[in-house]
Amino acid sequence: MIRFRCLILPVLFLSVSLALVLAAAARSPLPASKGGVGPNRILILDGSPVHDAGNLWVHASNFGMIGSWPGANLPFSFAPSAQWPGGSNVEYLYTAGLWVGALVNGVPAVSTAAYEFEFRPTADPRDIVYYSVFGALGGKRIPSMMADDDGDGLIDEDRLDGFDNDGDGLIDEDYAGISDQMLSRVFRDDTPEATQVYPQHNPMHLSVREESYQFSNPDYDDFVGFTFWITNDGNVTASDAYIALFADGDVGNRTTPNYWEDDGVAFRNDISVDLGPHGTQAYDFMYMFDDDGDGGEASGYCGFVILDHPVDPTGSTAPTQVGAVTFRNFHPGASFENGGDPTNDFERYEVLSSQSIDRNPVVPFDARGVVAAGPFNIAPGQTVSFTCALVATPRGDFTNVQRAATAYHGLWFDLDGDPNTGIGGKEHQEHWYLPNDNPVPVAITSFEPRVADGAVHLEWETWSDEGLAGFEILRATGSGDLRALGDGMLPGNQHDYVDRSVEPGTRYDYQLVAHGAEGWTTVSARVSATVPRAGLALRQNVPNPFSTETMVSFTLPERGDVKLAVYDVAGRRVATLFSGEQGAGDHSVEWNGVGDNGERVGAGVYFVRIEAGKQTVTRKLLVMR
């Protein structure tokens, strides 16, 4: 069934003689299949880019549009639009899309992905939709020790887009694979195709990289997250810019005639989310619903929650806080002045920049609305990010909105090893991790032995202590079997250990085992250390000079015969302090100044000499009377 609104536009008959009927605001035709003719050949139109890993099934394009225009007889209209639960045929969205509006040299310009398709990929065949998942080849992310997938010292520098972004001759070899289903694509607002289809389009020379994410965890599978990185590739600042989401939310079973006629659209700015040690934050949510719930078949809410964008405490380059400054709803059939759809850039920018929040309508209608954040100033070469989530949730229950915000908040990690940075020593945030995720077993980034003071000092570092129960150190003598060292497990926040139970001259092998709270283990490489045998040492006598007695200390590297004696300046032995076998280690002998002849030696300079094996060490001492 073809959907009719207030205006029907038969446009651009294709080779298959198919005239497409679009919504009143839509001016663009689409080809009947992927890779069609004319200006639409670069769009992916076969309905294949769909998030279906979770319970909310969403069609996601490569031109900034979200949804599938159910009933419009477009090539992708058969695909789920925003179907919840997935597979139920109950839709919550006709179409939605990114809007970016700004003043360019003082003139309003707004680029849109719905209803118009002014954002488009280039004609490069690589500008398609790319798919990935957490842990994919080339897609490792923090806290994995392989987050630098290509080992070049940089992390996630080659985004997933089919291009060699870092100039190393490799493609998509080091990006962040996120969630259980990730889609990535790139598009622009200044393609020749866009201006061909929309002669009144005023491009701002924006390039957009879009990623979207979905989880299969049953507590977190009712939303799809979106991040847009919007870059000004022009040479003029996009001033007083607003980033927005337009949504025409038709709610009901797609097989029910005219199911969109009794819908509602609403806005809330008070959905509070507890982010643990990072406090509580309120989020803004624009959502659509069926007024009577269709007998329980379509009894939920579905809409967009704004999760993040740049902020500026001064308000000069960005808003002072994250959230919506504008929410407007539109009535089909009405003029713009009377609450109808905006139909040109001046009207669209007037809507975005109004910084007004409409009252929630009380009468059901074919509802659609727009929610915007801003204003931003986007200078040439500057990139501004905007993150949101499309969320489905039971009527009157905003738990799934809170869960989307919690998932975006992600996990925090201690990467600098400084307990005084961040909160609880964790200073680095990674978005889109679930609260109970153990992203990877703790990565041991280094495990090094150091010999000092006759002991082996072991030191190690990890990417993070998240989910860590503790450490265990294994030791082997030589190449023998590894056995646990010490008593029990070391705390998870300990990163060093001193092994003093070593014998000089013996090689020891060590291995570090990290134990996770959930039972996993990570094992380091095996490292070796040898405490060298101590050389023969003779320390200075104490006190020196002396009159009545002094202490002479020495160290033997091994058991053997030792001679310790005092000589005068002529080299004559005057006193034997020790002669015989002695064990390895530290020893001391007291001398009272009496010579071998039984008489006290006279005042003057003497030398104490030790002989052990083939080694000899001499020290000078001074006798006073």
Image: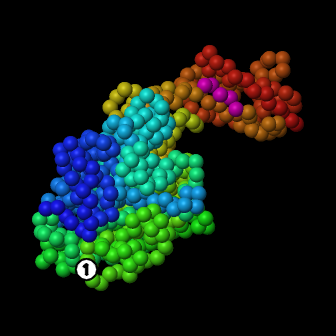
Find the residue positioned furthest to the top. 614
Q: Label 1 sits on what residue type? A: Pro
The part of the image, by quadrant, that contains residue 69 is bottom left
x and y, in percent, of residue 89 in the image: 14, 63
Residue 461 visible within the image: yes
Is 589 magenta? The answer is no
Residue visible at 39% across and 73% down?
336
Residue, disc 1:
364
508 sits to left or right of 537: left
Residue 211 versus residue 598 in the image, above or below: below
Q: Position of residue 80 (x, y in %)?
A: 20, 57
In the displayed structure, 359 sits above or below 446; it is: below
In the foreground, 234 or 323: 234
Which span is picked out in magenta? Answer: 535-539
The residue lying toward the viewer, choosing from 137 and 379, is: 379
Say which residue appears at 27% left-offset and 53% top-offset. 11
